[in-house]
Amino acid sequence: MISLDTCKQITYSPLIPAMRTICEAPLGETIEIIMDNKEAFNDLKEYLSEQSVGFREVYMKDRMILQFKKK
């Protein structure tokens, strides 16, 4: 499993490292992306839905986690 924590990302949008991780991951790899930015989290969920990628959402206090397998 590849895990990426984008919390406290202040230099640019957390979507940039998230998309980089997705693009660089091998097919079939399980990916976990941890965010504290609700807007970026919702954008990533929308992107995965548009790509027909099923995902699991986990909410923990101020953090949101998406877990999915790269197709």
Image (tube, grey):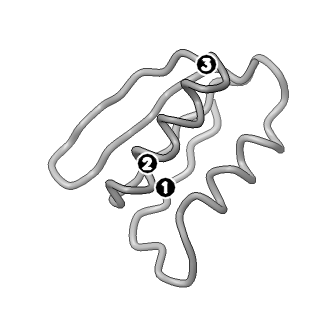
Which comes sooner in the sequence, label 1 or label 2?
1
On screen, residue 19 above or below 1 = below
- For label 2, the residue is 34
Amino acid residing under circle 1:
Asp
The answer to the question of whether label 3 and label 1 lie on touching residues, with beta carbons closer than 8 A, is no
Identified at 21% across, 42% down, the residue is 60
Spatial CA span between label 1 and label 2: 5 Å
Residue farthest left in this picture: 61
Which numbered circle lies on residue 5? 1
Distance (Cα) linking label 3 and label 1: 20 Å
Rendered image quadrant of residue 49: top right
Q: Residue at x 53, y 15 (%)?
A: 54
Label 3 sits on residue: 53
Q: Which mark is residue 38?
A: none
Q: Residues within 10 Å of mark 2 (few under 14, many from 20)?
A: many
Q: Which amino acid type is shown beneath numbered disc 3?
A: Val
Q: Viewed as shown, does residue 40 lie left or right of 51?
A: left
Mark 1 and 2 residues: CB-CB less than 8 Å, in contact? yes
Q: Amino acid at mark 2?
A: Ile
28 or 49, nearer to the observer: 49
Q: Residue at x 71, y 24 (%)?
A: 70
Q: Earlier in the sequence, mark 3 or mark 1?
A: 1
In what quadrant of the picture does the N terminus appear?
Answer: top right
Examine the rendered structure and indicate whether residue 41 appears above or below residue 8: above
**Quick one: quadrant of the C terminus?**
top right
> SS of the residue at dot 2?
strand
Q: Is residue 18 left or right of residue 39?
A: right
Of callouts 3 and 2, the N-terminal one: 2
